[in-house]
Structures are given as C-alpha cells and as structure tokens.
Image (tube, helix red, strand yellow):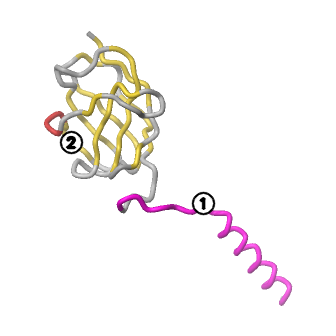
Amino acid sequence: MMRFLVASSLMLGALVSCAPAQTTNRFVTVTPVLIKVSGAAMRGGQVTIQGRYLGGPTTGQVRLGADETGKGGYRFPAAAIQSWTDSEVVLTIPTDAPVGGSWLFVEVAGKQSTGLPYSVRQ
C-alpha cells in the first residue's frame, strides 16, 4: 500500500509538472482560437466567426488582411460588430474593407488568436 501511495504521488507530480505554464497578458491566459468562419461575403455582407476564448467587444478586435503571422491588416471598427460572445463574433464587412483573400485574426487584450483564411468578394 505504501508503494502505491508513493508511486501515485510521484506520478501525479510528474503530470502536473508536464502541464504547460500559462502566462498572463493583461488578464488573458488562454490563446484565442478561431475554429470556423462563414463563407466569403461582399462589402456590406455579414461574417460570423466561431471560436473559443474570444473575449468580448471591449477587450477584442478583429483584423482582416493580415499576413499568415498576424502582422498588419485592416481592423474592423467597433460599429461593424453586430454581436460578440466568448465563442462567436458577428460583424458586417465595412465598405472600406480590403477586397480579396487574406487572413483573419481576433485579438483579445493584446493576445492574438490562431488565424483563418478569409476572402472579401467584390
């Protein structure tokens, strides 16, 4: 019985020590993850972004036209946001949004999400 307790304690400690350490970046500890984005739409059309840990409209922003690393791009203005929850963002593509294919990212309190390719049609 004593061997079991010692062995299980050691294993538990090993599992805990293998867990990735999370750092805090302005109170955001988890990387926002984009899972799905609706099909290509024209300017004035609606886009739905689904994901996890997307924060909210006061802490987040959506960028389109960034490169695959998330640099650069067009930031959607707050007026474009129709609704924003921790798992879904619905917005309207503004008339000055860039046309063509690029990458879409959500940034929450300075922490960049994974990216998805997206295209604004003409």
Q: Are marks 2 and 1 in contact (CB under 8 Å)?
A: no
Q: Position of residue 97 (x, y in %)?
A: 23, 22
Mark linked to residue 20: 1
Residue type at tag 2:
Ser
| 106 inside magenta stretch | no
Q: Position of residue 79 (x, y in %)?
A: 13, 36
Q: Quadrant of the N terminus?
A: bottom right
* Residue located beneath label 2 in the image: 83
Q: Main secondary structure of the magenta part?
A: helix
In the image, the segment drawn in magenta is 2-26
Q: Nearer the viewer, residue 82 or 26?
A: 26
Q: Quadrant of residue 14?
A: bottom right
Q: Residue at x 27, y 19 (%)?
A: 98
In the image: residue 63, left or right of residue 24: left
Q: Position of residue 21 (x, y in %)?
A: 57, 63
What is the secondary structure assignment of the residue under circle 2? strand
